[in-house]
Image (tube, helix red, strand yellow):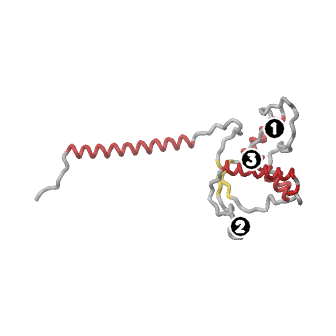
Amino acid sequence: MQGPAYLPTSLTTLVLAVCMAINVALIWQDYNFAQAVQSHAGTRRTPYPGELAIEHEPVILVSYKDGKYKLDADDEWASMFPRGLSLERTTNTSRTASPHKTLRIPSLYNQLWCLNTLRQIHMTPGWANDGCRDRQVHTCLNLLRQGALCTGDTALEPPVDRNHSPYKVPGYQVEHVCRDWAKVRAVTEAMLNSQHHR
């Protein structure tokens, strides 16, 4: 009876060395990945020039149907804007006007202004024959389209049902990861307050 066949010692050592090297490389790769995730999670992104300086900690919004913000609810729509913000368009006739001295607000409020404007125009009979309102509609739809593309909400939800079935409501009961709009509003109100007291 013959015993088990063994690999030569040098070949066994070589196989063990290669296995250990692969194992060490995989452990090192996992360590580097974990470090990268930790450093990214703890990093606060510096705002770009022209962006509101605020920490963007995500909040969860579960969308649902409520009775607010109906077509005729002017006060509720007005309540979404920060105190001190007037979105009335003014014309600056000064030839020395600098774009750096122009009031800048988060795009969120221009988008809400557009939604509110579209709501008001919808409630006005005959708006389609008004050239000024037609331009407003086009401008607002363009701004909202670009805002939706920029935000790029990746929450998964059922598609829009064109038959308006009561059983499929797109967007309701879906979790969305958002910027904290209460923080955006607070920082905007503080910014507006400081500009009014200059």
Answer with the quarter of the image where residue 122 lies.
Answer: bottom right
The amino acid beneath tag 2 is Arg
Please provide percent x and percent y for residue 108: 74, 47
Going from N to C along the chain, the mark reached first, 2 or 3, is 3
Q: Nearer the viewer, residue 102 or 174?
A: 102
Q: Which mark is residue 108?
A: 3
Identify which residue is drawn at 48% across, 44% down: 34
Q: Residues within 10 Å of mark 3 (few under 14, many from 20)?
A: some
Instruction: Identify the residue shown where x is 65% and y is 60%.
Output: 174
Q: Quick one: SS at disc 3?
A: helix
Q: Which residue is mark 2?
A: 162
Mark 2 or 1: in front is: 2
Q: Is residue 72 left or right of residue 51?
A: right
State which tag comes first along the sequence, 1 or 3. 3
The quadrant in which residue 166 appears is bottom right
Query: Residue 121, image x and y in percent?
Result: 85, 56
Q: Is residue 119 above or below residue 44?
A: below
Mark 1 vs mark 3, CA separation in Å: 18 Å
Q: Please, what is the three-letter code of the amino acid marked with disc 1?
A: Asn
State which quarter of the image contains the C terminus. Answer: top right
The amino acid sitting under disc 3 is Leu
